[in-house]
Amino acid sequence: MIRVATICVAMMIAFPLSGIGQEPRRSGSAVRPASASSMTKRSEGVPRPARPVGRLAASRQTGSSLLQETEVVQAAPANPSEIIVEDGGMMIGDGEVIYEGGESCSSCGDSGCTSCESSPYAAIGPYGIDICNPTGLGGRRLCICLPSHGWVSVDYLGWYQAGMNTPALVTTSPAGTAQAAAGVLPNAQVLFGGNNDILTDTMNGVRVRVGVWSATRPNAGAEGEYFGFGQQTESFDQNSTGSPILARPFYNNVTGLQDSELVAFPNLLSGRVQVDAESQLASAAVRFRHILCCSNACGYSTLACAPVQAQSRFDATLGWRYMQLREGLTITENLTSLSTANPGSFLIQDAFDTFNQFNGAELGVQWLGRRGYWTAETMLRVSFGNTLQRLNIAGSTQSPRGGDTLEGGLLAQPGRNIGVYEQEEFAMIPELGANVGYQLTQRLKLNVGYTFLYWSNLIRPGDQIDTTVNPNLLPPAIAGNTFLGPAFEVRETDYWVQGLSIGGEYRW
């Protein structure tokens, strides 16, 4: 009897101890112990599914420990087409864990679903027949739930910006035109300027985003963003020995008529005129993200050829944006007299440089939807703040070339517009964006997107060019001439940039 009692006591102690290490998985009110095969498979290196944010949040709110929420993954079947569905999680047959879906992500008012098996089309599809699996040997299913714990994305940007507007800067006239009418508007032909088509070529750049989700508040995260472009340039360069005629038009405020400064004219001048424009845009932002709500749904995807689980999520963002636009426009003349009675040479330059720097608060909302391997994302952000505007106008003349430099060119004149101007103005920067993504692997996704960004109240070099000139004040100035014309004013404009992006995103 003592031996029998001893055996009974040993069995009572052994059975409870056998459950240690097989921690239950909680799904609603059901608690299911792990099977031996699942534990064996996990020990062989099968990755555990990503835990949805909603379930983590629920775990912390109820005070349950993470150990009590340990996931249990069943062993992968021998048939790669077979799908294992477990409480909203899903694992394809080759052992790759995609993501986990669940009933906890239903804060948008959706009732959610426990797995893709709850779809009314799970067996036969919307057409009454499983067109992707007519033989019944198995189909492809996928469940993905967001968000993950962190992400980094890198995109190539092929964008276009609003063209810089300038007055007509270089003109020409047909051979035989009288010297007084050569290059004079409106009859002259414009070779460069007179429109807003400067700097409209493709801008090549890069955008990097890095973000993390909080470990203590899974519905909150932070993100940093930078995008920038290399320096964009556009040039006009023409040289003439006198034919064709080259000129720079202006408005003569002494005569009150259109006029021109000749660069090349037969038997009078040979010369070269060059216009160089440049632009460079960069931006950085830091923002906090908060998940407003998310929901699950189930349906049938003809693209995935199987029932799939879909998610939808709305985020709000709050942050700070910095943006700067640096631009410049320079006009250079290199003239040589062809008259033996009046020899000489000139090197004349006008330079207009602008710098805009924005700092302000940013508010935004973002929607992200996922269906199978595919994702769609749209966002709207608006930044409010101040733009620091800085304008530098400079002009110089050397006669002869290599001689002493005199202040003043043709369109940049001392006492009229040469100098540095600085001011601050309130500005807004709204941004619209859309992306389509495809999940290449469990963590790597390919993205293709479009972005439109608008910037109000800034300055650009072309708008600061005033063609009103007193020719008697051109270096060297004729004494006794002091009339400069209307006072110079800094002119503001708006700016936009838009284009496509392609890149990759990695989540962990």
Image (cartoon, grey):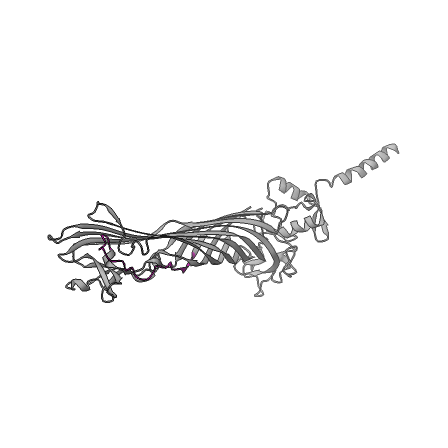
Reply yes or no: does residue 476 show up in magenta.
Answer: yes
Specify the quadrant of the image occupied by residue 170. bottom left
What percent of the width, then of the height, locates residue 500?
Answer: 43, 56
Please tell me which residue lies in front, 378 or 51. 378
**Residue 209 can be seen in this image:** yes
Residue drawn where x is 63% and y is 39% of the image: 43
Q: Find the residue positioned furthest to the right.
A: 1
Q: Quadrant of residue 14?
A: top right
The picture places residue 398, in percent across and down from the top left corner, at 23, 48
Magenta span: predominant SS is: loop
Image position of 42 with respect to 144: above or below:
above
- Residue reaching furthest to the front: 480
Q: Picture coordinates of residue 473 (x, y %)?
A: 25, 56
How many numbered discs sit on the rendered protein? 0
**Quadrant of residue 305 within the rendered picture:** bottom right
Q: In this view, does 428 lie to the left or right of 478?
A: right
Question: Which residue is at the front of the view, 273 or 416?
Answer: 416
Q: Is residue 132 left or right of residue 469?
A: right
Nearest to the observer: residue 412 or residue 152: 412
Residue 429: % across, % down:
47, 58
Is any part of residue 144 visible from this angle?
A: no
x 61%, y 60%: residue: 297
Judge whether residue 477 is colored magenta: yes
The quadrant of the image that shows the N terminus is top right
**Residue closest to the far left:** 340
| Stretch of the chain drawn in magenta | 474-499
Q: Residue at x 12, y 54 (%)?
A: 339
